[in-house]
Image (spheres, coloured by chain):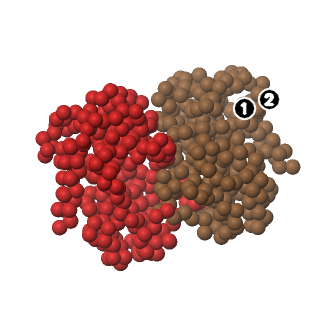
Chain colours: A red, B brown
Amino acid sequence: MVMSGKHAIFNGKLIDAEQAVLPVQDKEFQYGFGVYESLRVIQGRVVYGEDHIMRLFYSAEGLGLRHPYTSEQVTSYLMLLIEVDAIEDATIRILLMGGMEARLFITVAPLLTYPKSFYNEGIKAIAYNGERYLPQYKTCSLLMNYMALRQASSQGAFEALLVDRNGLILEGTRSNVFAFEEKSVYTAPVSMVLEGVTRDKIIKAAKKLGYRVVFEAPRIEDVLAGRFNELCISSTSMGAMPLSMVDDYTFNSNFSIITAIHTLIRQWELDALH
Amino acid sequence: MVMSGKHAIFNGKLIDAEQAVLPVQDKEFQYGFGVYESLRVIQGRVVYGEDHIMRLFYSAEGLGLRHPYTSEQVTSYLMLLIEVDAIEDATIRILLMGGMEARLFITVAPLLTYPKSFYNEGIKAIAYNGERYLPQYKTCSLLMNYMALRQASSQGAFEALLVDRNGLILEGTRSNVFAFEEKSVYTAPVSMVLEGVTRDKIIKAAKKLGYRVVFEAPRIEDVLAGRFNELCISSTSMGAMPLSMVDDYTFNSNFSIITAIHTLIRQWELDALH
């Protein structure tokens, strides 16, 4: 368990970080009836905070998880926490658990970053047969993601690509997936996956760089047959991260497209802070 | 949240019940990487305790969830808790969360019982399209069960029957399912469902009462077309509970088979206590 903040927020109130707990007898905890977001704080400012809060509420609505919070309130809690603990760089997690009375936790962990080599050399991924339940929402139902990720780790891979019953790569365990073929980029439509905050930026960046965005999930058999020049995963913490291998297939690429996209979206992040 | 016990067990140590909590920053909590069991305590004795503990360990092994506990240790924790709080009748929950160090919680709630009318008149169920992830294990991945059960409740039903992509009723959200046709009873094979402790007793009881047990999951279309005389759900807390309706289909039955089976398995429970 990573715990960096001295404080946390519970239902709008500042608490000590170690008081951010849930009773194991809590019914909604037992059922995993909750939604969450992970946000980046850079230079004391939340990156795309409003987008994340809107998606938290979208996930809650999708599950019929009622709560009394407004975007302004959650924003003010984030500000309070950043101020009290003088946070510069961090990953902040918002957890909204359902129930007779919804419970909102905001906790702080160190900023999640990755080695430069991951971006320069690409990372390995495995294919894993599995479909998330309610994939459009960011829910606490993550056991399959955990199992898939553990299998990836045991094979020296960094991510598992989730392949549905039709052979489509819909997403990673904690990422969206993009496959580049000449001047086109393929990714699953939002009806099938979480509408990633970073996914949206990558689509914008790809268009800006002259790529045609096709909302069709790439097929695993096409990846393994070498159809795509480059493949990347994306998330708030990763940005756009290139894949060097999927199972036994190796990409023969310098990842120039993905590097350009990653650079652009990180620049936009910084621009948005000021 | 129902909390009846004064105490709980955490990793073998007696604690106050309100200290049975998990930090929301705990990675395994966030991923739902845990397994559990619900047990009945009657007359101060655990019903089929060893069966439940064995299944807890079976679920843990299925997930690759490592822990240091033995059946004897868990049994002794249960005994300790029952003695300290002078428990007569209760539902006990064992939760085993994975991680670098596994964590074992044992908590106490009031004995879960149901009105006699549920057994005499049967209960209503709805059909819900959904498949559990790793259905052979009793895991914390229960969001679909929660959503299905909530939909059932909103339609005045007590249970949702989970129908897989092939139209088979594999199980309920918290129960196994049995369908009776003349002198045969149909239920999903253990390869497809949780090997219920009560499921096993119902199979034994059905055989004793002269029924042939067929390990084939009943089809929802056959249920709705009136193929089966009686249908029941089963669990530790329910025993064998008859269904009066599934969606719009009404069973025209006095539930004589199911009542006989329920009576027999409850008698066996009492016999096993002494």
Q: Are marks 2 and 1 on the same chain?
A: yes
Whole-percent x, y for residue B101 in the image: 59, 58
Return the mark for residue A97. none
Q: Amino acid at mark 2?
A: Lys
Q: Amino acid at mark 1?
A: Ile
Q: Residue furthest bottom?
A: A84
Quick one: A222 or B195, which is closer to the camera? A222
Chain for disc number 2: B
The residue carrying mark 2 is B208
Quick one: B200 or B223, which is closer to the camera? B200
Quick one: A160 or B159, which is closer to the camera? A160
SS of the residue under disc 2? helix
Whole-percent x, y for residue B11 in the image: 66, 62
The residue carrying mark 1 is B203
Is disc 2 surrounded by few (<14), some (14 to 19) or many (20+) residues within 10 Å? few
Q: Residue at x 13, y 46 (%)?
A: A208
User: Does any portion of residue B153 appear in the rendered image?
Assistant: no
Q: Residue at x 24, y 41 (%)?
A: A254
Task: Give the left or right position of residue B81, taking residue B34 as reference.
Answer: right
